[in-house]
């Protein structure tokens, strides 16, 4: 095979599709993993595989099949995720665990499946985190917790994989408008990524993917995606207390509430 091969989880969503389009435009072969691919029409140099990433048997079978067809894997993008919106006082333990199962444990289990193939290709792991992965985010305790865990894992993995010639990069967007037309959360506050109605300065999936892929090419360890994410990154590093106050007031304003 001459084409580089990328595997993208959450590939049927808006951001997954945009990342795939950007990679395929540069000659990549892309494999999309998602729980439901029934509405997905694959393009040239693109393959879709149905898989519930939280099911160990399904994940193992899907990854084995991918590696049979594509022995060389150059890039794995951990994009699958859900959000959960609401106060911690209303968060059930079941919902809390579900967020971690999808946002954290599924990604780390997938990383284990592709650890050796990416080492062999001296390739790249790209984790799609969030502003909530390095800072607090109002009414997102479970989501922020899962993204903080995701970042901690991949930042630590970076040190382990560097001797193998492997890059580990993290992209952190703020609000990407992928599911605003399906914004109704479930009773437990869980909803699709990109469905939050209290977001700030939304980016299109295409714009977000462009920034991520540019950062990928430049081998940037951390890729804040968009104006809000860049501002949040620098402000949170300079003054975490000030960032928290600004974030609380802005989110409360958009929700038409008094800030805490």
Image: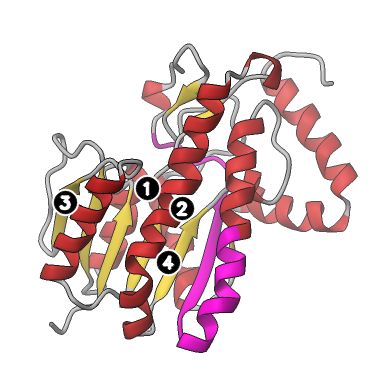
* Distance CA(mark 4)–CA(mark 3): 20 Å
Q: Which residue is mark 4?
A: 213
Report the residue at 84% width, 21% height from top.
260
Residue 134 image offset from top left, x and y in percent: 69, 51
Within the magenta stretch, is there residue 64? Answer: no
Label 4 crowd (10 A; few <14 / some 14-19 / many >=20): some
Label 3 crowd (10 A; few <14 / some 14-19 / many >=20): many
Q: Which residue is mark 3?
A: 48
* Distance CA(mark 4)–CA(mark 1): 12 Å
Report the residue at 71% width, 27% height from top.
251
- Are dots 1 and 2 in contact, CB under 8 Å? yes
Within the magenta stretch, is there residue 154? Answer: yes
Secondary structure beneath label 2: helix
Q: Which residues are magenta?
A: 153-178
Residue 61 image offset from top left, x and y in percent: 19, 54
Secondary structure beneath label 4: helix
Q: Nearer the viewer, residue 193 or 257?
A: 193
Q: Which residue is mark 1?
A: 15
Mark 4 or mark 2: which comes first in sequence? 2
């Amino acid at each position: 095979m001459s084409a580089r091969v990328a595997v993208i989880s959450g590939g049927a969503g808006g951001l997954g599709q945009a990342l795939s389009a950007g990679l395929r435009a540069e000659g990549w072969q892309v494999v999309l993993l998602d729980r439901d691919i029934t509405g997905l029409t694959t393009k040239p140099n693109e393959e879709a595989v149905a898989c519930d990433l939280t099911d160990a048997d399904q994940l193992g079978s899907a990854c084995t099949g991918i590696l049979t067809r594509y022995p060389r894997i150059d890039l794995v993008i951990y994009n699958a995720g859900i959000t959960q919106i609401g106060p911690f006082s209303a968060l059930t333990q079941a919902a809390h665990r579900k967020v971690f199962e999808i946002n954290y444990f599924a990604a780390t289990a997938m990383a284990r499946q592709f650890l050796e193939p990416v080492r062999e290709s001296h390739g790249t792991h790209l984790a799609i985190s969030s502003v909530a992965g390095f800072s607090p985010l109002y009414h997102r305790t479970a989501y922020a917790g899962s993204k903080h865990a995701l970042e901690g894992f991949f930042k630590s993995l970076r040190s382990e994989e560097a001797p193998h010639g492997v890059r580990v990069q993290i992209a952190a967007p703020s609000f990407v408008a992928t599911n605003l037309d399906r914004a109704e959360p479930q009773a437990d506050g869980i909803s699709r990524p990109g469905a939050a109605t209290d977001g700030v300065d939304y980016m299109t999936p295409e714009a977000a993917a462009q920034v991520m892929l540019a950062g990928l090419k430049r081998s940037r360890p951390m890729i804040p995606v968009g104006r809000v994410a860049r501002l949040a990154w620098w402000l949170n590093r300079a003054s975490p207390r000030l960032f928290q106050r600004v974030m609380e007031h802005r989110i409360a304003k958009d929700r038409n509430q008094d800030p805490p």
